[in-house]
Amino acid sequence: MRRNKRPLRPHQEGDDKEEIAKLRKSLFKEFEMKDLGELKYFLGIEVLRSKQGIFMCQRKYVLDLLAETGMVDCKPADTPMIVNQKLYMKEKAELAEKERYRRMVGKLIYLSHTRPDIAYAVGVVSQFMHQPQKAHMEAVLRIIRYLKGTAGHGVLFRSNGHLETQLYTDADWAGDKGNRRSTAGYFTLVGGNLVTWRSKKQKVVALSSAEAEFRGIARGLTEVLWRLKKQAAGGGGGTEDFVDVLLKIQKEDSVGVPLEKIAIKALLLDAYTAGTDTTATVIEWAFTELLKHPKVFKKARDEVRTILNGKQRINQDDINNMKYLKAVFKETLRLHPPIPTLVPRVACQDVKVMGYDVEKGTRVIINAWAIARDPKVWDEPEEFRPERFLDSSIDFKGLDFNLIPFGAGRRGCPGIAFAMATNENILANLLHKFDWELPNGDKADDLDTNERTGLTIRKKTPLLAVATPFSS
Ligand code: HEM
């Protein structure tokens, strides 16, 4: 997630002397205090300044820890933890010395203030404080051996000229062998600098890897929403995006019902999930069908390259003229709707549809995939033939019920325009900038179109193709 590419006002860069003097004066007025000059060392954290920026580390703290544990001469480890090591409470395992373990882990937790690289490993070992076993102690000693080789690592804050917020999240699935709980982590960057990070075991058992990931995303969103709210309160400026609009609605209470933080998180997750997998799926299918049908491929590529006529950057006007490319997408969405059964609906009252009685509460599933392959409405439905759309007014916007890859009606996809602009841009660029062939001399006929099960129906085996840069 990236947002808020805002230019910095001078005082936000931290070197506005006038503003600093003003702040100092008002602090002296409010509190009884003494100015000790630039911060260099505070509670074990060293602060170094250079042209590159401000660097924070706990080198001395690490050296003290090595001395205290008698590990000054130990052999350094490359990583804080053995890859894929699953630590858990083993029955009847030999116990470690509790006091020593707690003291060491306590110090490692404090060290995590400037060491995001050990956050995960420290998070794991801190779960066994109540009754540490030998294996847990070995994991702690390994973290310390890792620190031996990386004592000078820390966090650098530099002025990158913007205050953009970025969030990255990730999660494992059922990583804890003991109770099957997953661990998720996030880190946020502001102005390109790492400001917060966390790795934490989830409270409930996620039933799928997707659930574990979503819980991780939701946790990360809580973190950035808090930060962005503070930023907005300080007068953010710049262009409004989706998150700004939601926060504004919340603040001004402008939709008649309160917009809770949990609803904002749900809306962001909704747009994220609805917009990412679907787009990736349809691009993969479009490219698979193009590679499987060399004549169609050539026609689409020639159209793109003729319209661009040597130009490097593609704009929306160019894409609007790519009629064949648009037909390729309609045909792809007909044969491979990424969400083949749409989103389920529930009848909220008894209704009669085409002579059938549908009782209130009935769950209705619409098979958009089957409709789009129905020989009663489509000529040679199993064929991939984009030409069928060239002289046809049929579109996927929800008005032609024989082609509804985005659904229809009030529940229909609100992201159609965005999705198609993204899809068309990606495919046009792939055709414009590269020549393509199948790997290992594979033939077009060898390309399989088997589907994988899931909410979005992707290709069973991921598409592999070899790209050679093309310049006109
Ligand atoms: C090729 C790309 C996409 C396809 C095929 C697609 C398809 C769909 C379908 C079939 C539905 C359910 C409609 C219904 O049941 O009537 C839906 C809902 C939705 N789509 Fe899309 N979509 C795509 C891209 C996007 C994008 C890029 C966004 C947003 C950035 C988006 C946001 C949504 C949202 C918010 C919903 C409503 C979910 C709900 O009802 O809770 N979609 N989409």
Image (tube, rainbow, N blue to C red):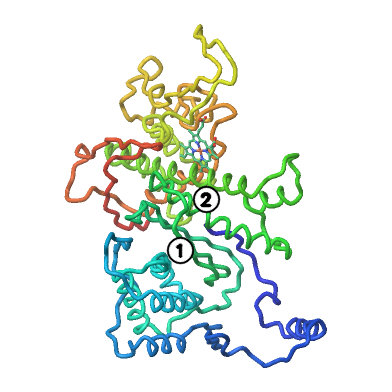
Determine the secondary structure under disc 1: strand
Where is residue 300 shown, x and y percent of the image?
37, 41
- When asked about the image quadrant of residue 226, the answer is bottom right
Q: Residues within 10 Å of mark 1 (few under 14, many from 20)?
A: many
Where is residue 444 shown, x and y percent of the image?
22, 40
Q: Nearer the viewer, mark 2 or mark 1?
A: 1
Q: Earlier in the sequence, mark 2 or mark 1?
A: 1
Q: Residue at x 53, y 55 (%)?
A: 219
Determine the secondary structure under disc 2: loop
Residue 74: numbered disc: none
Q: CA distance from mark 2 to mark 1?
A: 41 Å
Amino acid under disc 2:
Asn
Contact, CB < 8 Å: mark 2 with mark 1? Answer: no
Q: Is residue 117 left or right of residue 20?
A: left
Q: Residue at x 38, y 82 (%)?
A: 150
Where is residue 44 shown, x and y percent of the image?
52, 86
Q: Say which residue label 1 marks.
A: 199
- When asked about the image quadrant of residue 157, the answer is bottom right
Q: Residue at x 46, y 76 (%)?
A: 106
Q: Observer-nearest residue: 124 or 383?
A: 124
Amino acid under disc 1:
Ser
Residue 315: numbered disc: 2
